[in-house]
Image (tube, grey):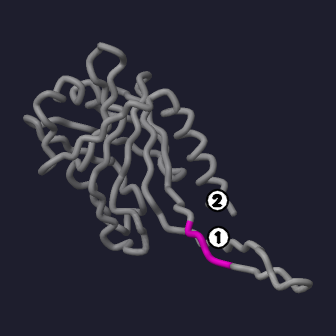
Amino acid sequence: MKSVKKSVKYLVLMLAVFGASACEKEIQIIDGKIPAQYLPEAQAVMGSYSGIFDDNSNVLTAQLSGNYVSLTAQQDLLDPRCQSHIGSLKTVGVTKDGQQNPHITSAAFDFDPNDCVSFSGRSLELFFQSNGVVHARLLQTYEPVPQCSAAGGYPGGVPIQNCWTDYVPVYLTGTFSKIQ
């Protein structure tokens, strides 16, 4: 039940954060290198971010080396025994506010849970806000949710019940604030 509440809480948070940014364009990244036209916007989100991820304190650091973007975590995001690894940048979400320059609003990095293979997530997603706050999420698992509906039935008989299982994503989440 805790994980369903966490999923709902995260969904409401993401709707609030991105409700006004309906014009987001997702840019596919090759070899972790951000396209040259987005380097100034990428520079704006580089730095260290302190916060909590899955109830644990951590620091994320985003760096540019030429046009290659790297992201590191001070502590393992899952558990020190996992020896998980944040990999290359995969996508960047960009919005334009009217005629102004584009802004990076999201980024996704390859993620390797290494020794914690039970984690379904292979992508660490970041959502940037203009005030220096970053929301992070990593898919943990899919939780089965049984569903049933009754329809029709025979004349004078019992309705026919149709049942199935939906799988709802459950995320580990965190919020970080820029410190440099």
Residue 19 as seen in the image, left or right of residue 9: left
Please, what secondary structure does the residue beneath circle 1 have? Answer: strand
Q: Is residue 173 magenta?
A: no
Nearest to N terminus: mark 1 or mark 2: 2
Image quarter of the N terminus: bottom right
Taking the spot 47% from the left edge, 63% from the top edge, the residue there is 140
Q: Mark 1 against mark 2, which lies toward the viewer?
A: 1
Vertical position of residue 165 compared to residue 27: above or below: below
Q: Which residue is mark 2?
A: 4
What distance separates the C-alpha of mark 1 from that of mark 2?
Answer: 10 Å
Question: Which secondary structure dominates the residues rendered in magenta?
Answer: strand
Image quarter of the C terminus: top left
Taking the spot 74% from the left edge, 72% from the top edge, the residue there is 149
Viewer-proximal residue among 95 and 40: 95
Quadrant of residue 25 within the rendered picture:
top left
Q: Looking at the picture, how far across and down is residue 146, in whole percent? A: 67, 74
Q: Looking at the picture, how far across and down is residue 67, in whole percent? A: 11, 36
Range shown magenta: 163-167
Local packing at callout 1 (Cα closer than 10 Å; few below 14, some 14-19, many 20+) is few
Q: Looking at the picture, how far across and down is residue 95, in whole percent? A: 34, 28
Quadrant of residue 107 within the rendered picture:
top left
Q: Amino acid at mark 1?
A: Val
Q: Which mark is residue 91?
A: none
Please, what secondary structure does the residue beneath circle 2 have? Answer: helix
Vertical position of residue 131 compared to residue 49: above or below: above
Vertical position of residue 106 compared to residue 102: above or below: below
Q: Which residue is mark 1?
A: 145
Quadrant of residue 119 within the rendered picture:
bottom left
Local packing at callout 2 (Cα closer than 10 Å; few below 14, some 14-19, many 20+) is some
Viewer-proximal residue among 150 and 75: 150
Residue 8 as seen in the image, left or right of residue 27: right
Taking the spot 32% from the left edge, 37% from the top edge, the residue there is 93
